[in-house]
Each structure stands twice: as C-alpha cells, then as structure tokens.
Amino acid sequence: MNKLLSFALLAIISISNGIIFSQIELPDDKVKATISLNQDDCSLEVAVDVDIVEGWHINSYWLPEGSFSIPTNINIEKSKNYKIQAGVIEPPPILEFDEMADEMMSYHHHKFKLKKKLTSKGKKDYLLKGTFSFQTCNDVKCLPEFEQPFELKVKACGPKLELKEEQKPVDKPEVTEESQTTDTTREGPQLDVIDDAKKEVKENQTSSQNEEESKSFWLIFIISFLSGFAALLTPCVFPMIPMTVSFFTKQSKSKAQGIRNAIIYGLSIILIYVLLGTLVTSIFGYDALNALSTNVTFNLIFFLLLIVFAFSFMGAFEIRLPSSWLNKADEASDKGGIIGIFFMALALALVSFSCTGPIVGTLLVESATIGGVAPFVGMFGFSLALALPFGLFAAFPGWMNSLPKSGGWLNTVKVVLGFLEFAFAFKFLSNADLVVDAHLLERELFIAIWIGVFLALTLYLFGFIRMPHDSPVEYLSVGRTMLGLSSLIFVIYLLPGMWGAPLNLISGFPPPITYSESPQGFGGGGMGAPAHIEGEETHPGPHNLPLFHDYDKALAYAKKVGKPLFIDFTGKACVNCRKMEGNVWGKPGVIDILRNKVVIVSLYVDDKTELPKAEHKTVEYAPGKFKNITEVGEKWSYFQASKYKKNTQPYYIMIGPKGEDLSNGGADYEHHGSTKLFKNWLDEGMKAYEKANSNK
C-alpha cells in the first residue's frame, strides 16, 4: 500500500508542479552489467554479469504473487533470425518478507549471472539487439526502472560453422532453466514437494502474464472512465459543475487563480477516489482479490450488492452516508487554501454518494475480480472523468452556456444504469451457481431474466413505465428513442438463445450451453447428440466435443490412439474461457482439429469437488508458506502454476507422444483470441507432434 500511495502522490504532484522525471537519480552508478553472447552453432545464450554496490539490490525475474516490484528481465527484440526461449535463467533469489510493504520480496545482490537462451536461424551474420531492464532498490527506496540497451554480433550457424575460441561456451556447471522449474517431461501432475519448487513462489508470473494484466488494466481503465462520464450525467453531480466552477472564478482574484483552484479541485477528486481504490486493495490483499471471481461467498455478496445498487438507482431508496461526515467535510472546506479545496472535493464526493456510490461499488466489484492494482486503476479512470469538466470549464467558462439544463433526463440516466446493474448482478449469481454445480440458474433461466430486464428497459425508454422520481414524458427525444430501439433489438437477439442459439455477442456472460435444461438444444438449435468416446470417461463439451476431466486417463488414451493431448486449463466461472469456446473453437479449421486430431482434457481450476483422502497433499509454494490441496480445482491450479508458471485461464498446452510439452508453447485468450492465431498455434503443435512421433 505504501508503494501505491507513493506512486499516486508522485503522479498528482508531478501533474500540478511539472516535475521532470529525468531529474530523478538514475541507477547507472549502482549496478554494473556486462552483457555478452555465448554461441554454440545455432544455440545462443545472452549472458549478463551483474555487479551491484553494497547496500543495493535488484529484483529477481520471478516475483512472488502480489508483488508490486518491477521484475528484472532480458528483453530481446523480435526477429526472424532466431527463436526466443521463454524465461530468464537466474540463481536462487533471496526471499525476504517485508513487513512495511506487507509482501514477499525476491531479489539479488552483489555479483551474479543471468542468462537468456535463443535458437538461431540465421544463415548470415547479424546483430542481436535488446535491453537489460531492472529496478534498483535499497532498504529505504526504489529508483525508477532502468533499461540498458545492447547489440551482440551473431555468426551464421550451420553444420560447418566453426566458432572462434572466445565464442565457445564456458564448460562449467551452471544453473539451468530446467533446474528451477518442475520437470516438463514427467507424465501427469506430481504434487509432491520437490526441492526446486521450494525455491520458487506459487504462481510466478511470466512476461506474457504481465502483458495480459496490462491489457486487463487498460480495459478496466476505459470502463471506469466511461462510468465516470456516466456519473457526471446524474442529478447529484451534473448541477454541481456550473455551481462549483462559478464559485472558483468569482472568489479568485484573477482568471489564472480561478483556473488553478479548479485544477487543484479536480486533482483532489482524483486523489480521493484513488485512495479509495488503494484502500480496497490493501484491505483485501492481492491474493484475495485475484480469487474473488471463483469464490462462492463473494459472488453472492456481489450479487446482493448490485441488486441494492440497482434498486437505489431506480428510486426505491437513496444510499446516504452519515450526515456528520458531510458536516465535518463542509466545515473543513471553509479553511481556504489547498486544504480547503481538498475538503470541498471531499464534500462533493460525500454529497453525490447516492449517485456515484453504486457506480463506484460496481467498479470496485469488477476490478476486484481482476485483482492486483485494478481497483487503483479503476478509481483513477473514474475520478479522471469526474474531475476533467471542473478544470476545463474553469479554463473556458463560456462553454457552460452550452451545457443542457438540469431536468428529468438526469433521473432517466440513473434509472437506465439501474436496469444495467440489475442485469449484470445475475452474472455473479451465475458464477456462484456454476462453481458449486447447483443447476439453479441454468442458461435458459439466465437468458430469460435478461430478456425480461431489457424488455422492461425498452418499455421504460419508450415511456410506458415510470419510476418514482421521473417527470412525465411529453415526447421522446432522438437519443432516448434510439436507445430504446437498441434495447428492443437486443431483446430480439436474445430470444433464439432460449432454444440453443450460441449468442456469441454475449458469450461468457450466460452459462455455457452444456449447463442448461436442454444441453442438446430444442428444435435443432443445440449441439445434437451427446458426445462420448466408447469405453472412456468423457463428458460433452462445447460444440459437442468429447472432453476428459482426468489428466492421467486422457494422457493414457492419447498415447493409445496416437494423438496429441490438448490440455485446456479452464474455469466454470471464466468469462474468457467461454468466449474462446464460443467464438474460436467452433470455427472451420479449428473445430476439425479439436474433433478429429487431438484428445482434449479440460481441467477446471475452480472445481470444488473434494479429492479422495489419499490424494490430499500439502505443498510448500514459498519458503515457510504451505497450502493444503483438498479439492480438484486446487490440484489443477497448482499443476498449472508450478509447471507452466501461469495462473490465468484459459491456458492451452499440447502434449507429445512421450508426455512432453510440444514446442509450440502455450496459448491463451490474450495472444491467441482470434481464429487465425489459434489455428496457427494448433497447426504448429500438430507439426511438432508428427516430428516428435517420427523420432520415437
């Protein structure tokens, strides 16, 4: 939390005072890195010899879950001349729990060596370019991330290549990448605690994971920014814009001072909401937030919370904070100066809580299911949209003449948001139902609820329904008519889903077709006859594909029939898993491979079924930290995290004839979410399997 607070305050101060970050101390005098290349024919190894001055350290490549530190990395520019192997080879890091930051630190100090392996494809000499990036810290502070560029000359490789003496690899034992990860050639997941697993933390993040999280954070930022804009159009906030801006311009001695005060006011709004997001992150913790999407209790709480917010927006009641809070904030705002402006912003947040509270609550719920610093990012996006008008209208007060007058349309915005929150609430109820496999909210009922909600919204927008605080609708504006028409079209689109239509537009929100009253559809709209492999324990999956749910049985069958094993790490409450299955798996070319050329095993990481007592395990995922594995989902989650260093779903792996991972690597939603990319990945896997099979 301390690091997040520091970053938030630094960002706000730098915006207002124009701090130039190039003036901050750089780490080039703390860390000396010598970068070289070892080449053995087509095998390349970028070696970084690091020497750090006493009292300083840099973070390790693998970082504990929940760490806000920046990992050390050897970044290689992409090129057709070589293939980059995943990960960085590093010596065992120093693991130390930081009570102040409340997180496990993983770092290196003094002298050590890092390595990055590649396979060269170049028939001619070329330059290999990249950067060595790291963050330097001591016991007091961390310096900004530093990137050291490098260029290394690579010789053409081939059968007749003769390396010069200085290029030959050092013939002494080194720490290898395989010694730091679980064995990738063993058959089936082994949950016994092994020596190398003790040196790593659970669910270490790879660089591709960081990219996925970055995209998720951008998505939550955009959604939050749009939500903040929607909050501006509510009756609690919109009328405050001209009133507040007029106050600053009239009370200030000059126009410049009025603009400055309004900007400080906007920055104060951002700070208040960012602190709220930071507080949520610090209370729940990174680990807890990341697990909320599959936690039954939290999903039920979120469902009830969104229902309450929806009723509040529709006018059943108002959610108010204690009046004493508002009175104290109002009194503090009379002090004047920056402190007074800050408390004016706090007073606005408290006064407008009945309108912004449900939106903020919904954003925190959504960002909590993403985990990490998503609540921080979400609150920044929301508050930025909320604060912008105050600064802009203070700078250009003439614009206020073009603002629409307050009126009944503001309440209409609230009611529409209420309908949307009511519909989205059932996604959380569906998550809880899917995880416990209760079959209380199956696909048909979920779609029926959405049809009812959006039909009621259509009637409301067309003026057939009025809510408690609505004004009479004398005529329909163009905007209201188009919004009502869009809602009606959406209702018509949903109707075929009651009879088994896939509804790709909302794939991931309703339960999958297999989780319905009629999995095979009604009237020819579903999957047809249930899929099954004679004599095997398979279950019908998406597009009527036969799926195993037991890894060992699936691997044995794959070897028996001579096909690669396709591992699908998935989740019952996984939205992106359903999107991949609905929008990609069934496409021509992809479905042919999945149906005829591979054996599929779907491993649900949120399956709450208890394992047999004999399979209960206790694993050490970090020094001194243990976890009991008693459920099926925990077994597969640990398998994915310990072997593949991934904790996101969906994640796909193809297994070869000897139980080894094929050379096409892993696939996920972020990088293989289109039909073309996923099919290319499958094709690479099939070629790798044929090559491995021919070498048996």
Image: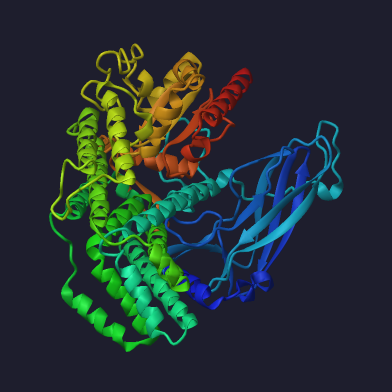
Horizontally, residue 20 falls left or right of residue 139, namely right
**Residue 411, quarter of picture:** bottom left
Picture coordinates of residue 582 (x, y %)? Answer: 39, 28
Residue 182 image position (x, y, % from top left): 50, 42
Q: Nearer the viewer, residue 112 or 322?
A: 322
**Quarter of the figure that contains the C terminus:** top right
Left or right: where 159 falls relative to 613: right
Colour scheme employed for the rendering of this structure: rainbow
**Residue found 35% across the figure and 18% down from its top:** 544
Q: Residue drawn 17% across and 77% down?
A: 324
Residue in front for this viewpoint, 84 or 455: 455
Q: Nearest the camera: 142 or 522?
A: 522
Q: Is residue 170 visible?
A: no
Front residue of 457/32: it is 457
Quadrant into which the N terminus falls: bottom left
What residue is drawn where x is 27% and y is 50%? Answer: 417
Q: How many numbered markers are drawn?
A: 0
Q: Is residue 175 visible?
A: yes
Coordinates of residue 402 in the picture (x, y in percent): 40, 62
Left or right of 404? Residue 76 is: right
x%, y% of residue 225?
41, 56
